[in-house]
Amino acid sequence: MIKNLYIHDLQIQRKVVERLSDGSFQESWKIIANIKGRVVPASLQVQEFYAAAKDLKNVRYTVFCDVEDIQENDIIIFEEKQMKVVNVREPSHMGHHLEIDCEEII
């Protein structure tokens, strides 16, 4: 069972824009969820897909987790790494799990 492989603690953050009382706007990062998942180096196939699409994203990791509210441009915090979500896939389309392509923010 794939859930037995979820050994990493992950924090999901999303950028939010708030309107301040003076009418200006402030951007900040909000914690969406703290979840269990698995972080692995991205497969060569995934890396080649982005290269073939001439996409400049440097996909370095794939994150596996239960189906959660995770979107492109969210940030996943794993240990000392901050990873930007590049793509979110639900391969089974049955609410089973997500595969998330990420690039490390350096």
Image (cartoon, rainbow, N blue to C red):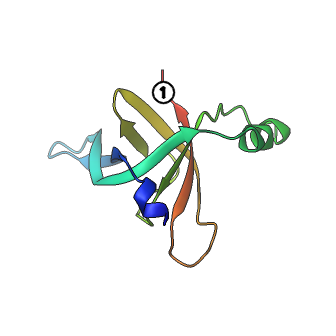
Residue drawn 45% across and 67% down? 67
Residue at 64% across / 66% down in the picture? 91
Q: Tell me which corner region of the image, top left, top right, bottom left or bottom right, holds residue 78.
A: top left
**Image position of 39 (left or right of 27):** right
Left/right of residue 66 with respect to residue 32 in the rendered view: right
In front here: 3 or 49? 3
Amino acid at the residue labelled 1: Ile
Q: How many marks?
A: 1
| Residue 20 on image: x %, y % | 19, 45
Give the residue at x 61% y 75%.
93
Compared with 62, 82 (above or below) is above
- Left or right: residue 99 versus residue 39 is right
Residue 11 image point, x, y percent:
32, 45
Q: Position of residue 64 (x, y in %)?
A: 50, 53
Q: Nearer the viewer, residue 82 or 91?
A: 91
Decide: is 3 above or below 57. below
Q: Helix, strand, or loop for circle 1? A: loop
Going 27% across and 47% down the picture, which residue do you hit? 30
Badge 1 local density, few (<14 within 10 Å), some, or many (20+)?
Answer: few
Q: Which residue is mark 1?
A: 105
Farthest residue toward the right? 52
Where does residue 18 sit, x and y in percent of width and height? Answer: 26, 48
